[in-house]
Image: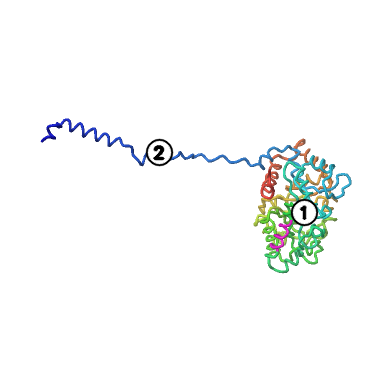
């Protein structure tokens, strides 16, 4: 009774309405918790600049052309092999800005000297250069010819092939690669992917893994895998196959007389395997193959072989190297300063050891920058492949 005396129905209604309004304005805890979360940025973070790509974009035409060349370390005047970078060689190399250097036993004295030589070579170019050599094992071992280099002896490819075990080829490659990497090398012009054909007069012999194309394919691919997994770019050679070619392309015209059917079931098998296994490089031989190139051009200068067969038909996406452009297999028929341009026009990305490097570089530069014989798109394609390989096997500052 007292309650009704103090609070009339009207007053009770007002109080109830006030209390309900207070309840409805209490913040929703769930919504508050969500709103307190930091806002998620849906925009992707910008990609960090690629120092290698930025460097390549900054290259002058002279430096772009230089990237195509791998040169020897010889005195510019006398042609004598050097064991150290002299002032004259430094001036010469800094003008060309080559994409790489190749060393021979004559450049090597001992590991300490070799490491210093390689460090000094690296200092000569704006773009880190490839440092290359031929280290197959057996008779072709640049390190093995210099006892003080203390290289691990590696059997000839024919002996490894005779084992029938491709793991032996991979093991040999890993040993070579670790020793090369420790010295500062980044390319090994190996393995030999040529199929030996007894009685053909070919010069490859024990450098081949054997006479069975499938065995050679397994061995060569295993060797390449061993090199590249240890940080050395592998270059399979000598496309389209030197094992049955009559003659030695080092010093004479060399011809492979085989029809298309034979080439497909013999010479090309190891190289197809190399392409399928994504080998970093393939070297063109100075071998004339009439069934593939009717104009008496060696493979190294043949668009039909380098571009149509290797690049387009087999689908090779890595670097195409020439064999040494000093060899008589090309110099006997073409002017030395024209050979690199012909090889590049045929489809090669990297031009190895031109006989007249300064003149060849200037000829290439004029063809591109002055006379526009070389298309920008063609040069850019090679530079992109070189950049990709250098990004994988070299360090950029």
Neighbour class for label 2 at 10 Å: few (<14), some, many (≥20)? few
Residue 288, image x, y percentages: 79, 55
Confirm whether the magenta stretch covers residue 175.
Answer: yes
Confirm whether the magenta stretch covers residue 224.
Answer: no
Residue 267: quadrant of the picture: bottom right
Is 165 drawn above or below residue 277 in the view shown? below
Neighbour class for label 1 at 10 Å: few (<14), some, many (≥20)? many
At horizontal 87% and vertical 48% (from top left) the residue drawn is: 79
Note whether residue 206 is visible.
yes
Q: CA distance from mark 2 to mark 1?
A: 64 Å
Q: Secondary structure at mark 1?
A: strand
Is 126 drawn above or below residue 269 in the view shown? above
Predominant secondary structure in magenta? helix
Note whether residue 305 is visible.
no
Q: Quadrant of the C terminus?
A: top right
On the image, numbered disc 2 is attached to which residue?
35
Residue ranking furthest to the front: 2
At horizontal 70% and vertical 46% (from top left) the residue drawn is: 386
Region rendered in magenta:
169-179
Q: Secondary structure at mark 2?
A: helix
CB atoms at circles 2 and 1 under 8 Å apart?
no
Q: Nearer the viewer, residue 221 or 173?
A: 173
Residue 251, image x, y percentages: 85, 55
Q: Nearer the viewer, residue 171 or 320?
A: 171
Q: Which comes sooner in the sequence, label 2 or label 1?
A: 2
Residue 5, image x, y percentages: 12, 32
On the image, numbered disc 1 is attached to which residue?
133
């Amino acid at each position: 009774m007292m309650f009704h005396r103090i609070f009339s129905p009207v007053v009770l209604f007002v109080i109830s309405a006030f209390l309900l309004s207070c309840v409805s304005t209490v913040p929703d805890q769930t919504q508050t918790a969500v709103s307190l979360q930091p806002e998620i940025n849906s925009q992707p973070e910008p990609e960090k600049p690629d120092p290698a790509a930025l460097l390549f974009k900054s290259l002058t035409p002279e430096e772009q052309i230089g990237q195509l060349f791998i040169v020897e370390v010889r005195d510019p005047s006398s042609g004598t092999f050097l064991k150290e970078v002299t002032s004259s060689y430094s001036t010469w190399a800094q003008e060309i800005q080559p994409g790489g250097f190749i060393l021979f036993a004559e450049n090597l004295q001992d590991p300490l000297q070799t490491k210093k030589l390689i460090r000094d070579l690296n200092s000569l170019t704006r773009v880190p250069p490839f440092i290359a050599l031929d280290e197959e094992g057996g008779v072709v071992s640049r390190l093995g010819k210099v006892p003080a280099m203390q290289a691990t002896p590696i059997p000839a490819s024919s002996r490894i092939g005779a084992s029938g075990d491709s793991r032996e080829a991979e093991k040999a490659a890993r040993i070579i690669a670790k020793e090369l990497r420790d010295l500062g090398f980044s390319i090994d012009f190996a393995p030999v992917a040529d199929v030996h054909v007894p009685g053909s007069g070919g010069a490859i012999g024990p450098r081949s893994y054997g006479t069975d194309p499938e065995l050679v394919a397994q061995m060569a691919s295993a060797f390449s895998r061993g090199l590249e997994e240890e940080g050395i770019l592998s270059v399979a050679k000598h496309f389209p196959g030197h094992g049955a070619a009559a003659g030695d392309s080092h010093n004479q015209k060399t011809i492979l007389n085989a029809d298309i059917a034979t080439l497909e079931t013999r010479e090309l098998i190891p190289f197809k395997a190399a392409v399928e296994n994504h080998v970093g490089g393939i070297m063109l031989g100075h071998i004339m193959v009439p069934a593939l190139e009717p104009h008496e051009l060696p493979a190294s200068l043949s668009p039909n072989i380098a571009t149509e067969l290797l690049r387009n038909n087999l689908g090779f996406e890595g670097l195409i190297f020439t064999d040494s452009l000093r060899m008589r297999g090309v110099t006997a028929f073409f002017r030395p300063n024209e050979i690199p341009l012909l090889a590049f026009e045929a489809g090669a990305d990297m031009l190895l050891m031109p006989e007249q490097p300064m003149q060849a570089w200037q000829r290439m530069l004029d063809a591109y920058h002055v006379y526009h014989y070389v298309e920008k798109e063609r040069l850019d394609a090679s530079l992109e492949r070189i950049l990709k390989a250098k990004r994988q096997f070299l360090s950029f500052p």
